[in-house]
Image (spheres, grey):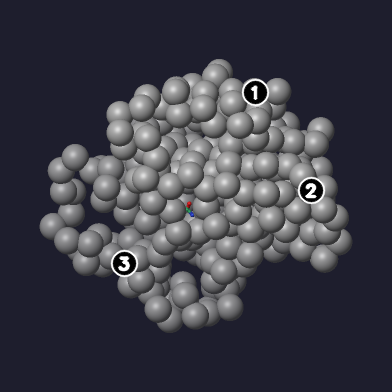
Amino acid sequence: MRHLINTADFTIDEIKEIFANAAHYKAGDISLSLQNRLIITIFFENSTRTRSSFEVAAKRLGAEVVSLDVSKSSSSKGETLFDTAANLDAMNPDAIIVRHQDAGVPKILSNYVHCPIVNGGDGAHGHPTQALLDLFTIMENFPDPEGKKIAIVGDIKNSRVANSNIELLSRFGLDITLVAPPHFMPRISAYRKTHYIQEVIDDVDIIMSLRTQTERHTNQIYASLKDYASDFCISKTLVGDRDIMIMHPGPVNRNIDIDDALLADPRSKILEQVKNGVFVRMAVLENLICR
Ligand code: NCD
Protein backbone atom coordinates (compact mmCIF):
# COMPACT_ATOMS: atom_id res chain seq x y z
CA MET A 1 0.00 0.00 0.00
CA ARG A 2 1.43 3.36 -1.08
CA HIS A 3 0.86 6.52 0.92
CA LEU A 4 1.99 10.09 0.28
CA ILE A 5 3.15 11.47 3.61
CA ASN A 6 6.37 13.18 2.48
CA THR A 7 7.78 14.19 -0.87
CA ALA A 8 10.49 11.56 -0.22
CA ASP A 9 7.81 8.86 -0.66
CA PHE A 10 8.21 9.25 -4.43
CA THR A 11 11.45 8.65 -6.33
CA ILE A 12 12.65 11.10 -8.96
CA ASP A 13 11.47 8.72 -11.71
CA GLU A 14 8.03 8.41 -10.13
CA ILE A 15 7.77 12.19 -9.87
CA LYS A 16 8.74 12.57 -13.53
CA GLU A 17 6.02 10.09 -14.46
CA ILE A 18 3.48 11.96 -12.30
CA PHE A 19 4.48 15.23 -14.00
CA ALA A 20 4.16 13.65 -17.46
CA ASN A 21 0.62 12.55 -16.57
CA ALA A 22 -0.19 15.96 -15.10
CA ALA A 23 0.99 17.58 -18.36
CA HIS A 24 -1.30 15.25 -20.36
CA TYR A 25 -4.22 16.22 -18.14
CA LYS A 26 -3.37 19.88 -18.57
CA ALA A 27 -3.38 19.39 -22.34
CA GLY A 28 -6.95 18.04 -22.05
CA ASP A 29 -6.10 14.37 -22.39
CA ILE A 30 -8.21 13.09 -19.48
CA SER A 31 -9.78 9.66 -18.99
CA LEU A 32 -12.15 8.65 -16.20
CA SER A 33 -9.55 6.41 -14.59
CA LEU A 34 -11.05 6.80 -11.09
CA GLN A 35 -14.64 5.98 -12.08
CA ASN A 36 -16.42 3.97 -9.34
CA ARG A 37 -13.71 4.92 -6.87
CA LEU A 38 -14.50 6.63 -3.58
CA ILE A 39 -12.23 9.29 -2.10
CA ILE A 40 -12.80 10.75 1.36
CA THR A 41 -11.38 14.12 2.39
CA ILE A 42 -11.09 14.93 6.07
CA PHE A 43 -9.69 18.36 6.93
CA PHE A 44 -9.23 19.12 10.61
CA GLU A 45 -7.73 22.49 9.73
CA ASN A 46 -8.96 25.29 7.45
CA SER A 47 -8.14 25.13 3.81
CA THR A 48 -9.07 27.43 0.97
CA ARG A 49 -7.55 25.78 -2.04
CA THR A 50 -6.02 22.44 -1.09
CA ARG A 51 -9.29 20.72 -0.23
CA SER A 52 -11.16 22.03 -3.26
CA SER A 53 -8.16 21.25 -5.47
CA PHE A 54 -8.14 17.60 -4.33
CA GLU A 55 -11.91 17.36 -4.74
CA VAL A 56 -11.87 18.85 -8.23
CA ALA A 57 -8.96 16.55 -9.13
CA ALA A 58 -10.81 13.45 -7.93
CA LYS A 59 -14.02 14.44 -9.73
CA ARG A 60 -12.22 15.24 -13.01
CA LEU A 61 -11.07 11.61 -13.03
CA GLY A 62 -14.59 10.36 -12.34
CA ALA A 63 -14.27 9.49 -8.63
CA GLU A 64 -16.99 9.98 -6.03
CA VAL A 65 -15.89 12.33 -3.25
CA VAL A 66 -17.20 12.44 0.30
CA SER A 67 -15.95 15.32 2.43
CA LEU A 68 -16.19 14.87 6.13
CA ASP A 69 -17.15 18.07 7.86
CA VAL A 70 -15.05 17.76 10.98
CA SER A 71 -16.97 20.38 12.94
CA LYS A 72 -20.09 18.23 12.50
CA SER A 73 -18.38 14.84 12.83
CA SER A 74 -17.99 12.74 15.94
CA SER A 75 -14.46 14.10 16.45
CA SER A 76 -16.16 17.05 18.08
CA LYS A 77 -18.03 14.55 20.30
CA GLY A 78 -14.76 13.12 21.60
CA GLU A 79 -14.23 10.22 19.21
CA THR A 80 -10.51 9.56 18.88
CA LEU A 81 -8.74 10.18 15.64
CA PHE A 82 -8.06 6.48 15.29
CA ASP A 83 -11.70 5.53 15.73
CA THR A 84 -12.64 8.15 13.14
CA ALA A 85 -10.05 6.66 10.78
CA ALA A 86 -11.15 3.07 11.45
CA ASN A 87 -14.77 4.02 10.79
CA LEU A 88 -13.93 5.79 7.55
CA ASP A 89 -11.81 2.82 6.53
CA ALA A 90 -14.74 0.47 7.17
CA MET A 91 -16.60 2.29 4.37
CA ASN A 92 -13.95 0.99 2.02
CA PRO A 93 -12.67 4.17 0.36
CA ASP A 94 -9.96 4.07 -2.30
CA ALA A 95 -8.02 6.92 -0.68
CA ILE A 96 -8.30 9.27 2.29
CA ILE A 97 -6.92 12.79 2.09
CA VAL A 98 -6.19 14.26 5.49
CA ARG A 99 -5.11 17.65 6.79
CA HIS A 100 -4.38 18.10 10.49
CA GLN A 101 -2.93 20.81 12.68
CA ASP A 102 -0.57 18.30 14.32
CA ALA A 103 2.54 17.05 12.55
CA GLY A 104 2.62 13.28 12.12
CA VAL A 105 -1.13 12.57 12.07
CA PRO A 106 -1.31 11.33 8.43
CA LYS A 107 1.63 8.99 9.08
CA ILE A 108 -0.02 7.51 12.16
CA LEU A 109 -3.36 7.11 10.39
CA SER A 110 -1.68 5.23 7.58
CA ASN A 111 -1.12 2.38 10.06
CA TYR A 112 -4.85 2.04 10.69
CA VAL A 113 -6.36 1.99 7.22
CA HIS A 114 -6.39 -0.21 4.14
CA CYS A 115 -6.17 2.51 1.49
CA PRO A 116 -3.64 5.19 0.54
CA ILE A 117 -3.45 8.17 2.88
CA VAL A 118 -2.55 11.45 1.21
CA ASN A 119 -1.13 14.16 3.44
CA GLY A 120 -2.94 17.43 2.68
CA GLY A 121 -0.74 19.27 5.19
CA ASP A 122 0.22 18.29 8.75
CA GLY A 123 1.24 20.96 11.24
CA ALA A 124 4.55 22.53 10.33
CA HIS A 125 5.81 19.19 8.99
CA GLY A 126 4.85 18.54 5.39
CA HIS A 127 2.64 19.42 2.45
CA PRO A 128 3.89 17.11 -0.28
CA THR A 129 1.35 17.87 -3.02
CA GLN A 130 2.02 21.60 -2.64
CA ALA A 131 5.74 21.01 -3.19
CA LEU A 132 4.99 18.77 -6.17
CA LEU A 133 2.76 21.36 -7.82
CA ASP A 134 5.39 24.02 -7.09
CA LEU A 135 8.12 21.97 -8.77
CA PHE A 136 5.81 21.20 -11.71
CA THR A 137 5.21 24.95 -12.14
CA ILE A 138 8.95 25.66 -11.88
CA MET A 139 9.67 23.03 -14.54
CA GLU A 140 7.13 24.59 -16.92
CA ASN A 141 9.34 27.70 -16.79
CA PHE A 142 12.69 25.92 -16.40
CA PRO A 143 12.45 22.45 -17.99
CA ASP A 144 15.90 21.65 -16.58
CA PRO A 145 15.74 23.04 -13.04
CA GLU A 146 19.21 21.80 -12.00
CA GLY A 147 21.29 24.75 -10.72
CA LYS A 148 18.42 27.24 -10.88
CA LYS A 149 18.55 29.58 -7.92
CA ILE A 150 15.54 29.92 -5.66
CA ALA A 151 15.07 32.14 -2.61
CA ILE A 152 12.48 30.86 -0.13
CA VAL A 153 11.36 33.93 1.80
CA GLY A 154 9.41 34.30 5.03
CA ASP A 155 8.32 32.14 7.94
CA ILE A 156 10.36 29.13 6.87
CA LYS A 157 10.64 27.60 10.32
CA ASN A 158 6.87 27.20 10.73
CA SER A 159 6.07 26.36 7.13
CA ARG A 160 5.24 22.84 5.99
CA VAL A 161 5.32 24.19 2.44
CA ALA A 162 8.96 25.22 2.91
CA ASN A 163 9.84 21.88 4.51
CA SER A 164 8.44 19.84 1.66
CA ASN A 165 9.91 22.15 -0.97
CA ILE A 166 13.37 22.09 0.57
CA GLU A 167 13.43 18.28 0.38
CA LEU A 168 12.00 18.09 -3.13
CA LEU A 169 13.74 21.03 -4.82
CA SER A 170 17.16 20.10 -3.47
CA ARG A 171 16.68 16.56 -4.81
CA PHE A 172 16.04 18.07 -8.26
CA GLY A 173 19.24 20.13 -8.01
CA LEU A 174 17.83 23.59 -7.33
CA ASP A 175 20.14 25.91 -5.46
CA ILE A 176 18.20 27.09 -2.39
CA THR A 177 18.75 30.22 -0.30
CA LEU A 178 16.66 30.70 2.83
CA VAL A 179 15.70 34.33 3.46
CA ALA A 180 14.09 35.04 6.82
CA PRO A 181 14.35 37.05 10.00
CA PRO A 182 16.21 35.18 12.78
CA HIS A 183 13.04 33.91 14.46
CA PHE A 184 11.70 32.41 11.26
CA MET A 185 14.95 30.77 10.20
CA PRO A 186 15.11 26.97 10.65
CA ARG A 187 18.16 25.42 12.31
CA ILE A 188 19.10 23.24 9.35
CA SER A 189 22.55 24.22 8.18
CA ALA A 190 22.90 22.76 4.71
CA TYR A 191 21.54 25.82 2.88
CA ARG A 192 22.73 29.35 2.28
CA LYS A 193 20.90 31.70 4.63
CA THR A 194 20.46 35.44 4.86
CA HIS A 195 18.27 37.92 6.69
CA TYR A 196 18.28 40.33 3.74
CA ILE A 197 16.44 39.74 0.48
CA GLN A 198 18.51 42.54 -1.10
CA GLU A 199 21.58 40.28 -0.74
CA VAL A 200 20.21 37.72 -3.19
CA ILE A 201 17.83 39.66 -5.42
CA ASP A 202 20.41 40.06 -8.22
CA ASP A 203 21.23 36.38 -8.18
CA VAL A 204 17.94 34.44 -8.14
CA ASP A 205 15.74 32.92 -10.83
CA ILE A 206 12.79 32.25 -8.54
CA ILE A 207 11.37 33.77 -5.35
CA MET A 208 8.97 31.65 -3.28
CA SER A 209 7.29 33.87 -0.72
CA LEU A 210 5.53 32.28 2.28
CA ARG A 211 2.72 33.43 4.51
CA THR A 212 3.63 34.34 8.07
CA GLN A 213 2.15 31.46 10.06
CA THR A 214 0.82 33.54 12.95
CA GLU A 215 -1.38 30.63 14.09
CA ARG A 216 1.80 28.67 14.92
CA HIS A 217 3.57 31.40 16.88
CA THR A 218 3.45 31.04 20.64
CA ASN A 219 4.28 34.69 21.13
CA GLN A 220 4.12 37.60 18.77
CA ILE A 221 7.41 38.04 16.98
CA TYR A 222 6.95 41.26 15.05
CA ALA A 223 5.25 44.31 16.51
CA SER A 224 3.02 44.16 13.46
CA LEU A 225 2.90 42.43 10.12
CA LYS A 226 3.62 45.86 8.66
CA ASP A 227 7.05 45.82 10.34
CA TYR A 228 7.68 42.38 8.86
CA ALA A 229 6.54 43.64 5.46
CA SER A 230 8.96 46.53 5.45
CA ASP A 231 11.82 44.00 5.44
CA PHE A 232 10.35 40.99 3.62
CA CYS A 233 7.49 42.04 1.35
CA ILE A 234 8.37 41.18 -2.24
CA SER A 235 7.40 44.36 -4.05
CA LYS A 236 7.47 45.33 -7.68
CA THR A 237 9.92 48.08 -6.76
CA LEU A 238 12.26 45.53 -5.16
CA VAL A 239 12.13 43.17 -8.14
CA GLY A 240 12.40 45.99 -10.69
CA ASP A 241 12.77 44.67 -14.23
CA ARG A 242 14.66 41.52 -13.20
CA ASP A 243 13.51 38.29 -14.84
CA ILE A 244 12.41 36.49 -11.66
CA MET A 245 9.56 33.97 -11.34
CA ILE A 246 7.38 34.84 -8.32
CA MET A 247 5.62 32.06 -6.40
CA HIS A 248 3.47 31.74 -3.29
CA PRO A 249 1.42 28.76 -2.03
CA GLY A 250 -1.49 31.00 -0.96
CA PRO A 251 -3.24 32.37 0.90
CA VAL A 252 -1.29 35.58 0.18
CA ASN A 253 -1.30 38.38 2.71
CA ARG A 254 -1.43 41.20 0.16
CA ASN A 255 1.18 43.92 0.69
CA ILE A 256 2.70 41.86 3.53
CA ASP A 257 4.07 38.87 1.58
CA ILE A 258 3.88 40.31 -1.95
CA ASP A 259 2.59 43.71 -3.03
CA ASP A 260 -0.47 44.33 -5.21
CA ALA A 261 1.59 45.55 -8.17
CA LEU A 262 3.75 42.42 -8.30
CA LEU A 263 0.75 40.12 -7.79
CA ALA A 264 -0.75 41.63 -10.93
CA ASP A 265 2.51 41.24 -12.88
CA PRO A 266 2.91 38.39 -15.40
CA ARG A 267 6.05 37.23 -13.56
CA SER A 268 3.76 36.18 -10.71
CA LYS A 269 2.80 32.50 -11.24
CA ILE A 270 0.51 32.12 -8.24
CA LEU A 271 -2.70 31.36 -10.12
CA GLU A 272 -0.76 29.05 -12.42
CA GLN A 273 0.33 27.16 -9.30
CA VAL A 274 -3.34 26.81 -8.30
CA LYS A 275 -4.29 25.65 -11.80
CA ASN A 276 -1.43 23.14 -11.91
CA GLY A 277 -2.37 21.89 -8.43
CA VAL A 278 -5.46 20.18 -9.83
CA PHE A 279 -3.51 18.38 -12.59
CA VAL A 280 -0.70 17.32 -10.28
CA ARG A 281 -3.17 16.02 -7.67
CA MET A 282 -5.04 14.12 -10.39
CA ALA A 283 -1.78 12.41 -11.32
CA VAL A 284 -0.90 11.73 -7.67
CA LEU A 285 -4.30 10.15 -6.96
CA GLU A 286 -4.11 8.08 -10.12
CA ASN A 287 -0.64 6.89 -9.16
CA LEU A 288 -1.57 5.93 -5.60
CA ILE A 289 -4.91 4.29 -6.40
CA CYS A 290 -4.32 2.58 -9.75
CA ARG A 291 -0.67 1.47 -9.73
C1 NCD B 1 -0.51 26.52 2.81
C2 NCD B 1 -0.91 25.55 3.89
O1 NCD B 1 -2.06 25.51 4.33
O2 NCD B 1 -0.04 24.81 4.26
N1 NCD B 1 -1.50 26.79 1.89
C3 NCD B 1 -1.83 25.86 0.96
O3 NCD B 1 -2.08 24.73 1.26
N2 NCD B 1 -1.82 26.25 -0.32
C4 NCD B 1 0.26 27.66 3.27
C5 NCD B 1 -0.31 28.59 4.30
O4 NCD B 1 -1.31 28.34 4.95
O5 NCD B 1 0.34 29.63 4.48
Numbered mark located on residue 256 in the image: 3
Q: Earlier in the sequence, mark 3 or mark 1?
A: 1
Q: Is residue 230 left or right of residue 59?
A: left
Q: Residue at x 28, y 43 (%)?
A: 216
Percent x, y of residue 133: 63, 52
Type of amino acid under label 3: Ile
Residue assigned mark 1: 114
Between 276 and 41, the one lying in front of the other is 41
Residue 183 vertical placement versus 144 (above, below): above
Q: Is residue 230 left or right of residue 20?
A: left
Residue 88 vertical placement versus 266 (above, below): above
Report, in whole angstroms, how far the alpha carbon at label 3 lies from the one at label 1.
43 Å
Q: Earlier in the sequence, mark 1 or mark 2?
A: 2
Q: Earlier in the sequence, mark 2 or mark 3?
A: 2
> What crowding class fits label 1: few (fewer than 14 Cα within 10 Å), some (14-19), or many (20 or more)?
some
Percent x, y of residue 222: 18, 54
Residue assigned mark 2: 35
Q: CB of residue at label 2: within 8 Å of ligand 1?
A: no
Report, in whole angstroms, how far the alpha carbon at label 2 lies from the one at label 3.
43 Å
